[in-house]
Image: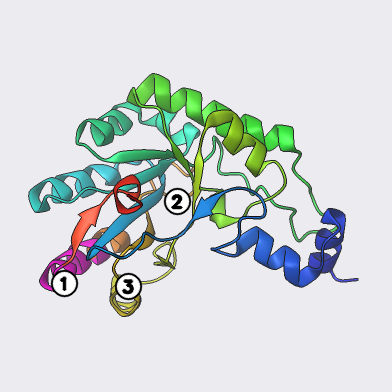
Amino acid sequence: MGRVAAAAGIAGISFGGAAYAVRGRSSQIFGRSVYRGSGKRRSIALTFDDGPSPGSLELLDYFGKQGVKATFFQCGVNVLRHPDISRKISQAGHEIGNHTYSHARLCPTLSWPPRVRSPQFILDEFSLAQAIIQAEAKVEPKLMRAPYGLRWYGIGEAQRTLDLLGVMWTVIGHDWEWPAERIVDLLRRKASPGGIICLHDGRDVRPNPDIRETLKAVKHLIPWLLDQGYTFDTVTEILQ
């Protein structure tokens, strides 16, 4: 039995079913989740994971000049590292979501034997991040996103306990690994009314991450989207 199949066997579901349940953008198996808005308006939601970081400030400055609002899924460790940046994001009118405390992978690892996270571990990750964001940014997140978009048993319980809606994405920019030109090309091709775009203003919980390619991509993408007649919503707004 392969490592992935063995991990699926732990859950008592097929390999194919496990793959969809864990990473399928429309999957509701581990908890209520969305990956796009209705598309009735020509709007897009920009989302940023893994922050805050010093690079978030350049995003804030640019968004302020362009009149853009976005949603930031923040890690508790990074909020503790940069509480002032988290507050500035909130005070600028952007939405803050919960991205766990430590950016831990929540589903079983592909190593052998696979490491399986307990429902209590998952609840603790989201609960601690929730408390830190409330204390530092002075807002109570209503949205959550699992690190890497990988979900597992215990996510639903955490969502119900903390009153959080899961958010996946319509398209992810691969900005942690691609140059700006390639990121922009993908997002232009995949942009659609009601879409939720996933980018990153951090790199898991690394200090002082290099997000220059993300920043370049955003500064090319937003003018193009505006030229195409798009407006920008937070995730909560795009779901209304």
The residue where tag 3 is placed is 187
The residue where tag 1 is placed is 224
Residue at (45% x, 51% y) in the render = 203
Applied colour scheme: rainbow
Residue at (57% x, 34% y) in the render = 126
Where disc 2 sits, the SS reads loop
Amino acid type, residue under disc 3 in the picture: Leu
Residue 203 image label: 2
Q: Is residue 211 visible?
A: no
Q: Earlier in the sequence, mark 1 or mark 3?
A: 3
Give the main secondary structure of the magenta stretch.
helix
Amino acid type, residue under disc 1 in the picture: Trp
Question: Around disc 2, counting alpha carbons within 10 Å, would you say few (fewer than 14), some (14 to 19), or many (20 or more)?
Answer: some
- In percent of width and height, residue 57 lies at 23, 42
The quadrant where residue 122 appears: top right
- Region of the chain picked out in magenta, as a range: 217-229
Q: Nearer the viewer, mark 2 or mark 3?
A: 3
